[in-house]
Amino acid sequence: MIDIHSHPLAGVDDGARSFEVSVEMCKIAAADGITHLVATPHCNYEYSFDAEGNRAKLAELQAAVGESPQLLPGCDFHLSYDNIQLLVEDPKRFTINGTDYLLVEFGDQFIPDQMDRVLYEMQCTSVQPILTHPERNPVFQQHPDLLYHWVTRGCLVQVTAKSYTGGFGRRALHFSELWLSQNLVHFFASDAHDAQHRPPILSECHEKLKKERGPEVADLLLKHNPQAVIEGRPLPPGLDPFDPSRGRKKRSWFSFFQR
């Protein structure tokens, strides 16, 4: 399995609190059958994002844990005006393993009206947004049709594995299962923050998916789709709702701010 969303780097956000915890998280991931772990530090108002420093920490952690799991860079990117300015300057600083795929996180209080335009502009510049854990977001819970709206416009969706297995409460479980039944989920990931309460565990989610949706779906959402992401390839044919052949014309990043 491949985990495209986790927080194992110590001292960069609210994830691992020490290097020892970082190592323990990686060992848990390897024992669980996770072959690749994408470290995705937050980039938001509370935590600054240092791409070069994160890569150095990633290399240090990889040396400590050995070959498995293979650690890859990424970012848990909060959509804000300041962040988008940084993104346009150098998108590859934030995307998963230097590909076009970017984990996008919304605030819990509200989603500005212009976000529809923002996501569209991102796609026009070849950045592929992956909306993270909407099942845990109060705004999406109150307005679940928003997810369908954005998926049909080319966004991808990552649900937290622990939400699907009940670890984040009934509402998160409900929306995980609802959106999965509506074919609106493209990935499950751990969003791991520590080694005890939120460890990098995907096997329980994989087992539930096998029982309820079949082994093909389980492998698709935890192996094949994530592998396409870390390799920078399109998702398997017929499953990627964003078709680059639509021929969308590129426009200015900041045109939506001028309306």
Image (tube, helix red, strand yellow):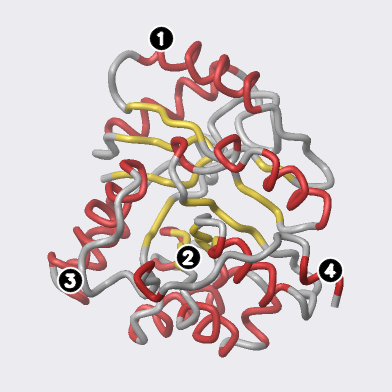
Q: Nearer the viewer, residue 37 or 32?
A: 37
Q: Quadrant of the N terminus?
A: top left
Q: Give the labeled residue for mark 3.
A: 211
Q: For the residues marked 2 and 3, what is the alpha-carbon distance in whole angstroms?
A: 17 Å
Mark 3 or mark 1: whose residue is earlier in sequence: 1
Q: Quadrant of residue 89?
A: top right
Mark 4 or mark 1: whose residue is earlier in sequence: 1
Q: Nearer the viewer, residue 245 or 6?
A: 245
> What amino acid is at disc 2?
Ser
Please provide percent x and percent y for residue 66: 32, 13
Q: For the residues marked 2 and 4, what is the alpha-carbon distance in whole angstroms?
A: 35 Å
Q: Secondary structure at mark 1?
A: helix
Q: Residue at x 38, y 45 (%)?
A: 3
Residue 257, label in figure: 4
Q: Quadrant of the C terminus?
A: bottom right
Please provide percent x and percent y for residue 126: 50, 56
> What amino acid is at disc 3?
Lys
